[in-house]
Amino acid sequence: MPQGFYWLILAQFFSALADNSLLIVAMAFLHEQGYPAWWAPLLKFSFTWAYVLLAPGVGHLADMAPKGLLMGWMNAVKLAGALTLLAGLHPILAFALIGMGASAYAPAKYGLITETVPPSRLVAANGWLEVTVVLSVLLGTGLGGLLVSDFAVAGLSQLWPNPPSWWVDTRLATAFALVLALYLLAALLNIGVPRRAARLPVARLQLRPLLQDFRQSNRQLWLDPLGGLSLAVTTLFWGAGAVLQFAVLRWAQDVIGLALDRAAYLQACVAIGVVVGAGLAAHRIALNRAATMLPWGVALGLLVAASSLLTALEWALPLLVVTGAVGGLLVVPMNALLQYRGHRLLSPGRSIAVQGFNENLSVLVMLGLYTLLLWLGLPIVPLMVGFGLLLAAGMAALMLQLRLKRA
């Protein structure tokens, strides 16, 4: 891989590790403060809003600034969001600020890969990236679960019994502080990220031209046969995945009977599987074979529905790992194909912004639906079965569409 690639991987890994740890700690904080369970998905909802609303501008911003430098700036914004949470800002608002940093971080990160890695190595590079992204979910979720466990909370409070007076009054104050340290580590690692020159000259970002350009870019990528197919797959995948991130936690607590800290470890089983699947895809699937992976999407939806029907932990664990592996096999080649087509049709920053807009709009819609169903009192098992079957049906429809186009 090119020089500096592994610094990029490490910097984004620790930044995402902090994001995922903070999510679990913030969920525990909401529970500690007496909020009902349906508030938890709203953390992710508020984190995601910026990916959608700021998409027309962040793509151009990523192309007008050196992407490595922009990653450092946006990591500082995420750190500021975490600090405001500690200062007493409501977690929903704090996560909205963190999401603003993440929304510009993403096109800089993915765009830098398309600029530095040749097409022949793009699937492998995406395999590295997706493995570390999923590892950040796996380890971040596990770390968050550890930090909110009664044992850890008691031990950490003894190590640091007197946090600053301006910090929010919570027994999780030290857990929040450790997450802040992860953001600082990511900032230090960002020093080694390649400093590629900006692709576009610095210009004034005017709203109307930005919206017109973004609408045209979005339309151009959707109308491209391979670009539109891969965008549809990743949009459906990440929307469903965001729901399942919370649904697995709820299912583990309601059906298996685990506390939040142990449920977080169970959620990590899915991430382990994704790492395995992503690694296999990176080494075995060429870019020109990405479209052949669609049947794995149907299998993924069916596995989600099947796993929710289990009530024994010893059966649930291996099936969740298999579910994650199938997801990794699907998303890594599709993501590489999408980046390849987007890089050729648009600039790297704009194509990643279009991708982020669609995927995160799907996240907002599906999380909103999930939160509404929880608020209405729908049990978690039929909810997961329904989402799994809808995912399978959506992937099957894309397979049929591809066959009709090739006929």
Image (cartoon, helix red, strand yellow):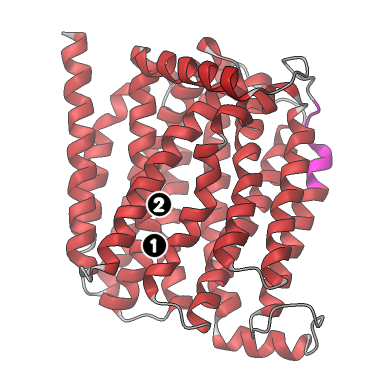
Q: Is residue 243 above or below residue 151?
A: above
- What x and y, as percent, mark residue 345? 51, 11
Q: Is residue 255 visible?
A: yes
| Residue 252 appears left or right of 385 | right
Over which residues does the magenta segment extend?
189-195
Q: Is residue 211 above or below residue 312?
A: above
How would you rate the neighbour count of disc 2 (Cα within 10 Å): few for under 14, some for 14-19, many for 20 or more?
many
- Residue 146: say if magenta: no
- Residue 192: say if magenta: yes
Q: Is residue 178 above or below residue 110?
A: below
Please tell me in which quadrant of the rendered image residue 42 appears.
Answer: bottom left
Name the residue nearer the viewer: 153 or 296. 153
Q: Are marks 1 and 2 in contact (CB under 8 Å)?
A: yes
Quickly name the residue at label 1. 246
Q: Is residue 281 visible?
A: no
The residue depicted at 78 percent of the width and 55 percent of the height is 185
- What x and y, as percent, mark residue 135? 55, 52
Quickly name the residue at label 2. 242
